[in-house]
Image (cartoon, rainbow, N blue to C red):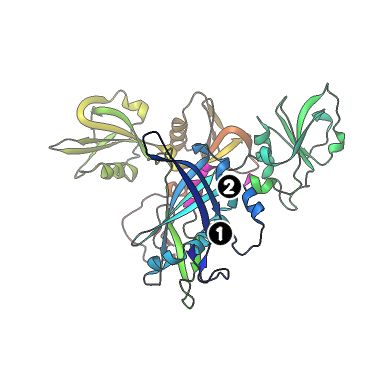
Amino acid sequence: MSSSYQNDMFKGYSPVAASVKRYKKNSKGSYYLAYSVHRDYYDSNSDLPESEYHAALQPIDCFQDPEKRLNLKFHLTCKDSDGCIQKSQDSVYEMKELFRSSLLGQLGISTTRVADIDFKFQKEVIEADVTFFEAPQISEVLPYVVRSARPESISKLRETVAGSAEKCLQYHSSFVASGAFNIPSAIIYCQKGNICFTTTNTTEMNHDSKETSCYIYTDPFKKLNRLGREKPLSDLHDHILGYFGHITFNMNLGEKAKAVAFQVTDVIDQSEGAKKQKIPFESLYHNSQFDEIDGVHTVMIPGVNRFGDCYRACSQNEDIPCETFSFCNRKDKKECVVSIWSELQIKNNLTSDSGCEIYSKNHLYDYNVRPNLKYKHPTTVFKDTREDDCAAKCYASNDCDSFEHCWGGKCSFGDNVTSEDTEFYYGCFIYTIKSSEKYKVTGTKLVSQVLYTEVDLDLGSMCSYL
């Protein structure tokens, strides 16, 4: 049971869940868990028969694979109320439902993808551990039939090439909008030839076994666009990072108390397979130093005793276009050298030096990625090129505004990315420069006259607008 001020079934309380656990004794006399069942109560005021509760399926039973789950830890804070964190412990159930509604409303994901929310009340912050499920496969949700047809003889609204039925449905999901296009009655995918198209006339299909076998998907409940907007687990953490200021909710902490505002201030990936944090540099050579420090191609930076300061001396250098840097962490002396030499040029300018290491800027860190997209008309093409090398080539070129990298090592340069100049293509990714990389440090003085100022922003946002 949980304390509640808005429930009329029990005085001051609301039922949250019921659990039954049964234990057996093994041959050594120790007890072990032999059976467990858990039931959540989402609407304690509804009058459903007990048989329907027993028949209800717990979503967690459908996602036994750990790779189809994502555990995120949210930090919640409250303001303008003394002791609001301590007081909120008496209304855990209401807090869970309000947080769930705010979270799903802002992120635009289905409520069935949230398995559980567990609160831990700390001194200055509330930790909410949330388990998310993987996004549903559209091909497993929409009804379909398999028929034979001649795709070339069917009138089409929109056509593309797709490697699977799921990729076909993902492509067309973004075009199903109210009034934007003719609403198709079916989406057809033929594995032979990877043919994928929409049509308004399914009467042109027949049952001739000599023709191509095709999957015909229909969307009677208008779910396609909604399903296509579901974020996969691999993108969910980054997606949530952009909603800190919007995931909020208000809750009364007493019958006559003023509502208190709660806000998400951080989110941390708790999964065992969580991605490593991207770093804007990479190690090139161990126990190595630049062979010659000439003050032009390589420059010694005095007074640097920490690695982070050495990296910033390269990334924020106004005198030379720094591409690589070295940091020597000797017991008696620290040294930082920045250089305009690229990774390929360094090979002929190395010398062995114990305690030193040479690093390269990771230009891939400077770009945002748009998956499953390719240029219709690329400007420059390279083959057998790694993703990070493609980013470095683009960054160094005056003629590259964005770049495309496809599976197999194909790297292409392009202009500004628009919907007219690009098309859906599975396995290709287009990278556009981050906004922060379009600005350069011009000095260490404050602007005296501004139009508007914001605080608590990172490098990705302007602090003051001229």
Mark 2 residue element? loop
Q: Mark 2 touching mark 1, by CB under 8 A?
A: no
Left or right: 376, with 308 as reference point: right
The residue range painted magenta reads 228-242
List x then y, in percent, for residue 146: 77, 31
229 in the magenta segment? yes
Q: What secondary structure characterizes most of the magenta part?
A: helix
**What number is the disc on residue 101?**
1
Q: Is residue 72 magenta?
A: no
User: Residue at point 21% right, 44% down?
Assistant: 304
Disc ID at residue 58: 2
Residue 62 appearing in the image: yes
Most foreground residue, 166 or 367: 166
Instruction: Please state, as top left, top right, bottom left or bottom right, where the C terminus lies in the image.
Output: bottom left
Q: Nearer the viewer, residue 47 or 156?
A: 47
Task: Give the side of residue 109 with respect to residue 273, left or right.
Answer: right
The reply to whether residue 399 is visible in this rendering is no
- Residue 67 rendering spot, x and y as whole percentages: 50, 37
